[in-house]
Each structure stands twice: as structure tokens, then as C-alpha cells.
Image (cartoon, helix red, strand yellow):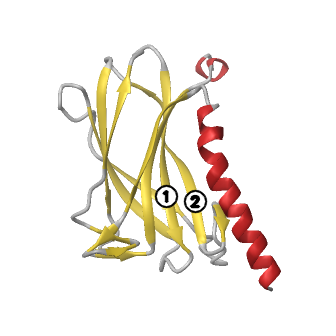
Amino acid sequence: MMHRMLNNWRRAALLLLLAPALAACDPNRVYEDNADLKANGQPYLWSVQDKPAFEFEITDPAQLYNVYFNVRNAMGYGYYNLYMKATLTGPDGKPVGAPRLHQMILMDPKTGEPRGNGTGDIYDHQFLAMPRQRFAQAGKYRVVLEQYMRQDVLPGIMSVGVRVEKVAAEGAAK
């Protein structure tokens, strides 16, 4: 048992060390950042008042982009899904379309088995939230995320984030 825990810890440490190097090798990535969540000084709590914002630069408005939402949750998270509202604002400070409500399935609704990639009782998910998004103009865009679970403080969500990547050339021709 102790040997298994030590091996899991070693794998997690190696993954954490290699992650920045692997991410640097991703030519399609334009932006990726995550925000750790806490409420009242306690970690892994997402308050409805906490609305993480992510700013990224678009330099080529002719390019199509995929926008992903990252979610890290503890196994003790009490629901199989997570509703999150996202508001996208353009370089002019005006909303780009209406805020969008996204449902992300973190665990199988029937079996309770976690989805995503996990080590121990922590699971990472990446959801394609805005496929083949076209940004009308070059400049800084901002995405604000808010939990929409009808609960003032949501326990078990450790962090959320945004990833923006260019759609590969062969995908853009479809």
C-alpha cells in the first residue's frame, strides 16, 4: 500500500515538473491560465462572488480559435456536473454576444465514476466551450467565469481556467 502511494506521488511530481516543458511545445496554444479558488481563506471553495477573469491577446482575427475551460476538482465534490456562466468581452470593453451557460460533466451521472485525468482524489478536466470561435478584431479579450450552481459557496472545485488555441489548418478548412 505504501509502495503504491509513493509511486503515485512520484508520478504526480514528475507530471508537475514536465507540464511546463510540454506546454511550451504546443504551437497552437495562444493562452492558458488557471485560477485557484478559495472563500473566506479556505481553499477549494468557489463563492458566487468570486468571478475569475482571464485576459488574452488575439493577433489574427482571420484565424479560428477553440476556447476551452479547465476545471480541477476534488473527488469529494458533491455533484456530477458543474454549471458555469462565461462572459466574453472584446477589446472595446463591450460583451461579445450574450453570456453563455455551460454544463460540464465531471463524473458519470449513473456510476459516479470521475471523468477527466486524475491522480489520487484530484481530477483535471478540459471542456471545449467555444469551438471554432472567430474574434472580430485583434486586441485583448476577457473571459469572466462564474459558478452557477445555486449554492453560495461550492466546495470541492479547486481551480478553473481558460485555454485558447488556434484551430489547426486542416480543421479550419472543413
The residue drawn where x is 49% and y is 28% is 65
Query: Element at badge 1?
Result: strand
The residue drawn where x is 37% and y is 58% is 84
Q: Residue 55: horizontal and vertical position, in percent?
A: 32, 37
Q: Residue 88: horizontal and vertical position, in percent?
A: 30, 39
Which corner quadrant holds the C terminus? top right
Disc number for residue 94: none
Q: Report the amino acid beneath label 1.
A: Val
Disc number for residue 124: 2
> Separation of disc 1 and disc 2 at Cα?
6 Å
Q: Report the amino acid beneath label 2.
A: Asp
The residue drawn where x is 30% and y is 53% is 52
Nearer to me, 63 or 19: 19
Residue 155 makes an appearance in the image: yes
Which corner quadrant holds the N terminus? bottom right
In the image, 80: left or right of 116?
A: left
In the image, 19: left or right of 57?
A: right
In the image, residue 40 above or below residue 26: below
Classify residue 95 by image quadrant: top left
Q: Residue 98: horizontal and vertical position, in percent?
A: 26, 41
Classify residue 48 by image quadrant: bottom left
Q: Which mark sits nearer the N-terminus, 1 or 2?
A: 1
The residue drawn where x is 55% and y is 65% is 106
Nearer to me, 20 or 132: 20
CB atoms at circles 1 and 2 under 8 Å apart?
Answer: yes
Residue 131 makes an appearance in the image: no
In the image, residue 86 above or below residue 32: below
Q: Determine crowd level at label 1: few under 14, some 14-19, many 20+ residues with C-alpha closer than 10 A.
A: many
Query: Element at badge 2?
Result: strand
In the image, residue 73 above or below residue 166: below
Q: Which residue is mark 1?
A: 71
Residue at the far bottom in the pictured view: 1
